[in-house]
Image: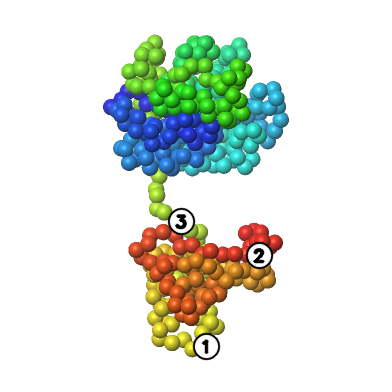
Amino acid sequence: MSEFIHLHNHTDFSLLDGAASITRLVDRAKELGMDSLAITDHGNMFGALKFYKECIKKEIKPIIGNEFYIAPASMKIKSGHESGNNYYHLILLAKDITGYRNLMKLTSVAYTEGFYYKPRIDFDTLKEHSEGLICTSACIAGLIPSLILQGREKEAEEKALEYDAVFGRGNYYLELQDHGIPDQKRANAALIRISEKTGIPLVATNDIHYVRKEDADSQEILICIGTQKKLSDENRMSFEKQEFYMKSDSEMMEIFKSVPQAVKNTRIIADMCNLKIELPGPLLPEFKIPADFTSPDEYLRHLTYSGLSNRYPVITDEIKKRVDFELDVIISMGFTGYFLIVWDFIRYAREKDIPVGPGRGSGAGSVVAYSLLITDIDPFKYGLLFERFLNPERISMPDFDIDFCFERRQEVID
């Protein structure tokens, strides 16, 4: 079991910054004998589920996180980018399902409410959603290291204690990185002093942006694309060293041999993170049915047979057999709610005289859909098969292709 665990890692979901594919990253961790691995992409969780599945497949514990951008004041203030003080970095890792849900909430808020050049949160929002999370002070673009590099070590100590109070002792760490960059060495010395004074633990990371050292050039090209610069530009953004790759256990212990506890704390953090994400497949909203009915299934049968009599003057045994068969399949596969939801918004459109298409694709093969006015094509008349749309052997969501008048479709969406 490896003593060191990589907890600060960027995949190619850190767009135009990370050059590590999830598959290669996880494969390399396996090759190095590491039993746990984190994902902390910049400001997003786009790759979290793919990473989770890939780690489980390779028998590595997945640690889901995000490197957030945190506004210096309120995320509602959207100015000051020119001063270069518009956001700081912060690492959050989910310990459990509560932490995972808080990660998702914070990530969403960052985009919907705090976005200004980057998706941002602020300290007050963080306090509201801190349960189940481990926090680290991040790289030298983090608030605490930034204050240190500005010569404001006392203020950095005070801010560190604020974060420690929010997350609780043992859930907040001062992060050390060493890629041979002078500013990192200055920051590390002060972070160690702050740790000694306050008791806030240290943690060592390597801020991975690519898998192997030789991938550094590829990452430089990505940065050039993202910043619209050329490799020949002397003043472009660039990583100073080619050290942002996945290093081995022994490499990291050698780099941080003067602070061995910072290495050991990566294992402590990994052991605290035991997130299990349930993957039940699509979860449909619960459709509210009238009080006269005992279940959505009963309501769907009622609506189907009510509509059936309007579609067919005479309900033959063949029609009844087909409808009962379709209903049994729909109900047994758990798609009652889906049919009711689609029926509901199409009913709304028709009542508001919003033009709706007759239906296309395999959904037109359902007599139940025809009865519910979801489609307008008689499956019996054209010999259309329900099984092309839905059958027990096809374990996937049914999909009605629906067309609305483009001038009024927003009313239906609303």
Element at badge 3? loop
Q: Do the residues labelled 3 and 1 touch (CB within 8 Å)?
A: no
Q: Determine the residue positioned at 40% across, 40% down.
A: 52
User: What kind of residue is marked 2?
Assistant: Cys
Instruction: Identify the residue at horizontal 43%, vertical 42% (top origin).
Output: 49
What residue is at 68 percent from the left and 27 percent from the top? 81
* Nearest-to-viewer mark from 2 and 3: 2
Question: Which sits earlier in the primary sequence, circle 3 or circle 1?
Answer: 3
The disc, 2 or 1, on the residue closer to the chain's N-terminal end is 1
Residue 283, labelled with which disc?
Answer: 3
SS class, disc 1: loop
Callout 1, which amino acid? Pro
As drawn, the label of residue 405 is 2
Tell me which corner region of the image, top left, top right, bottom left or bottom right, holds residue 110. top right
Q: Which residue occupies the foreground of this view, 49 or 209?
A: 209
Image vertical order of residue 17 relative to residue 276, above or below: above
Labels 2 and 1 touching (C-beta < 8 A): no
| Residue located beneath label 1 in the image | 313
* Comparing labels 2 and 1, the label whose residue is closer to the camera: 2
Q: From the viewer's perspective, is residue 364 above or below residue 241?
A: below
